[in-house]
Structure formats: structure tokens, C-alpha cells
Amino acid sequence: MEMEDPLIVQILPDHRTSPPSPTYIFTKPKPKPSKPILLLIFASVVSFAMTLGILFVFYSVLFSGWNHRSSFRYSVVIDAGSSGTRAHVFRYWLESSGKPVFDFGKENYASLKLNPGLSSYADNPEEASVSLKELVEFAKGRVPKRMLKNSDIRLMATAGMRLLQETVQEQILEVTRGVLRSSGFRFRDEWASVISGSDEGMYAWVVANYALGSLGGDPLQTTGIIELGGASAQVTFVSSEPVPPELSRTITYGNVSYKIYSHSFLHYGQDAAQKDHLESLQNSGEGIVTDPCTPKGYILNKNSHKDSSGFLVEEYKLTASVQAAGDYSKCRSATLAMLQEGKENCSSKHCSIGSTFTPDLQGRFLATENFYYTSKFLGLEEKNWLSEMISAGKSFCGEEWSTLKAKYPKTKEKYLRGYCFSSAYIISMLHDSLGFALDDQRIKFANKAGEKGISLDWALGAFILNTPTATCDYFAKSRKMLS
């Protein structure tokens, strides 16, 4: 028989046999919740809080993504270099304050390079439109159609074009302007131009220090850039020395001003220097002439051709019989003589290359472009890479051409042949001329920088400097200085 809980039973008097009397009620005390119930309540509260948190995060991400998408902007920079033309397509957005936010990851940045460079169309400028149209179509494929008319497109030509006569430059530029005017992008005629070497160096310096997080910080903690392009070499770094006005640039980023030495050594790019080397052999007289910068066994073709940079290599004009010697030490001496030519005309206290003033090296440096490509091909490590360059260069130059072709079957011959020259030229420039010690840890070779691995391409720096709505002082001063 089921028993009632005695704690909830009321004991009442018998109405039939007794007079009224007080009623006694036993009240059951409130039981303490058991541990399982407490855990269940706690779990419910936590679950509810987590649900709210997840909904908040989801809403924030969704709203943030919608906000970014609604404010995405686009810009295109076309780098018309000596070896090819590359289109860079950038996507960015603005914070509520109007400050642009850059992201050079795959989702927000893309590029495409086509060969040859614009300078190779000097004899037929109209042909320059063909590759440019292809690059424009590539850019249009990355930009929503509705945004084209609000997205800038700029073409900036560098050393390859600077080597041409101004009338020829203008003919090629006018062809490019015709393509860009009809592209659908926002374009002004002055946005297709040949930029100075100092501008190129400045842009490279900007993107390097942006990537490293030092742009906007202490000038003495910034990193200098030394570029070895096809037609020119650029040296750019913060210097505390007095610098001639023509070699000095000033930009302001945030509240920090940077006084920078920047110079472009035209004709001292790797391709141009190698061409000059061949011409020096041509003018050395008749008979047998040895070329220490060409691997042994290589035979010069008796014909004329243009390489990817547009330089005319007229081997058939050689009056002497050229014999490849593959001698690294002699090649280093020959390249050093090229870099020091005209030094007797130096009017400053210090000229590292030719007769151009160079202040004492200050701070850390990144060596880019052909410095990087040659170092990677030779398999050099970043530590002591300059000293390793010498031993690797000696080994490469001393190999027979047939052995090199068998060892590197996938490397194009025009590049393979050039590594003997470039390995010697790099040492002549960085160590023998600019004065970096062979074990100097201040200088590294690189093509990317920073935690995000941002490409050290000067066009990214040009994009940063030409993007509106950034700090007013920075843009007012830097644009004026860079114009």
C-alpha cells in the first residue's frame, strides 16, 4: 500500500466527537536541490550564453563582411618594366574613419606579367597595344563591372623606356593611353608616364617598410632597398648625412617624416650591364678575345636577336673571335671596372658607383629582384650569402656549358648563361663598390617581406602612395615630392 508523505499530512480534529480545536500543520522544509539539478541549470545557462555569443560573432562577421563588400574599392597599376609588363589589381576597403585598409593576400590582390617589355616596341609602337589589351582584360576580370568607372588604372614605365629617346617614349605612351582611355576604368592621360628611377626606388622602399611594419615608426629603424633590375639599379635608404637635393626625397607618413637618399643607376641593371660587357668585347680589337663571364664551351651565335628586355644583342657584329673562358675572378674584375668607370669625375667625398655620390650605408637592407633570383638559383642560404656567392659563382663559371645544360635542363639558355655574369656582378656591386662586408648580416636577399610575406614589388608601393583618403599630411607631401 502506498504511504502518504507524512510531512504534507494535515492532522485535523474529529468533528463528530470533539469540540473545535487548533489545527496543526506540519510544513515540509524546502529541499536543497540535488547536484544533478544544479549541473543541469548551470549547463543551460552556459549553453544559452554560448548560443548568444555564437549569434553575436556570426552577426558581427556577417555584418563586417557585408560592410567590407559594400565598401570595396579597386585600383590597377601597370608596371611597364624592361623585361615585361605586369598588371597589378588591388582590392581594398575603408574604415569608418576613411583610412584605407590594404590586404595583399590572394583574395584582394592579383597580377599577370607578359613579355616583352614596352621598350621592345621602339621600332613599331602600335604593337605595344596587343599585350596591354590582354592585361586590361585580365584586370577587368577582377573588378566588378559596376565599379570600373570608379577604379583607377595607371601605367608606369621604368628603366627600359627611360633608355629610349623621348620622342619614341611618347609614341609608345600615346598608344597605351588609347588602350586605357577605352578600357572602362577611370583614367587620365597623365596616368600613363615614364617614372624616374628615384620614384621607383621610393615606391620599393615604401612597400618594404609597410610589409615590415616600420613605416610610420622611427626613421632609424627602417630598412633600405637595393634593387637590381634589368636596365637600372636603385639604392634607397634613410640617411642622416647631408644629401644633395637631387638625390634626396622626403615623405611624411602619419606624424613621421623620412629624409631618404634615393638614386637610380641607369645602364647598371643586370641586362644592360651584360650588354655593355658584350660591346666592350666587340670593341677590343680583332683576333681571339676571351669572355670570362661566359661558361666554357658556349658558342656565340652569329646573328642578332632581342632578349626579353628589348635589348638588341648583336653578336654577329663581334669583330673578334670570342672564346668563352668561364673565369669567375676575371669576370669579377671586368664587372668592377664597369661599375667604377667615371669615378675619377666624382665631385663628392664619396662615390660608390661611377661618379654619383653615395652616403655611408645606414641600417638594414633588402637586396631584391636579380639579387634574389641569382641567389635562389645558386641555392644560397641567407646567412653569409655574399661569401657563398663567390664560391658558388666560381663553381658555376668553371663548369662546361654542356654540363650546365644537362644539369639544368628546364632553365632557358639565355638565363642559364647569364648566371656566371650575375654572380660576379653582384659581388662587384654590393661588396667591391657599395662596401658591404662578405659576412655582413645587415643585408639579406628577398622578394617578400613581413609576417604576411608581402611581395617586394615597387608597384605595391605606388598603389599605397596613390590611394586617396589616407593621412592628409602624408599624401600632400609625398605626392608633391613624388610628382
Image (cartoon, grey):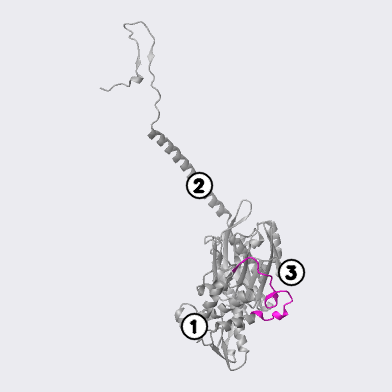
Q: Position of residue 414 (x, y in %)?
A: 53, 80
Q: Position of residue 450 (x, y in %)?
A: 56, 61
* Label located before the other in sequence (1 or 2): 2
Q: Describe the element under mark 3 as helix, strand or loop.
A: helix
* Label located before the other in sequence (1 or 3): 3
Q: Which mark identifies residue 296? A: none
Q: Seen in the image, is 483 located left or right of residue 386?
A: right
Q: Name, please, the residue furthest toward the left.
A: 1
Distance from the alpha carbon under mark 1 to that under mark 2 = 62 Å
Comparing labels 2 and 3, the label whose residue is closer to the camera: 3
Which residue shows up at 57% across the image and 79% down it? Answer: 424
Quadrant of res 226: bottom right
Quadrant of res 475: bottom right
Q: Are the residues tagged 2 and 3 within 8 Å (C-beta)?
A: no
Q: Position of residue 258 (x, y in %)?
A: 68, 62
Task: Give the crowd class for mark 1: few <14, some 14-19, many >=20 residues within 10 Å.
Answer: some
Q: Which of 71 and 3 is in front in this view?
A: 3
Span highlighted in magenta in the image: 339-366
The residue that label 3 is drawn on is 245
Comparing labels 1 and 3, the label whose residue is closer to the camera: 1
Q: Which of 186 and 294 is in front in this view?
A: 294
| Residue 101 visible somewhere in the drawing | yes
The residue that label 1 is drawn on is 399
Q: Which amino acid does label 1 sit on?
A: Glu
Q: Which amino acid does label 2 sit on?
A: Val
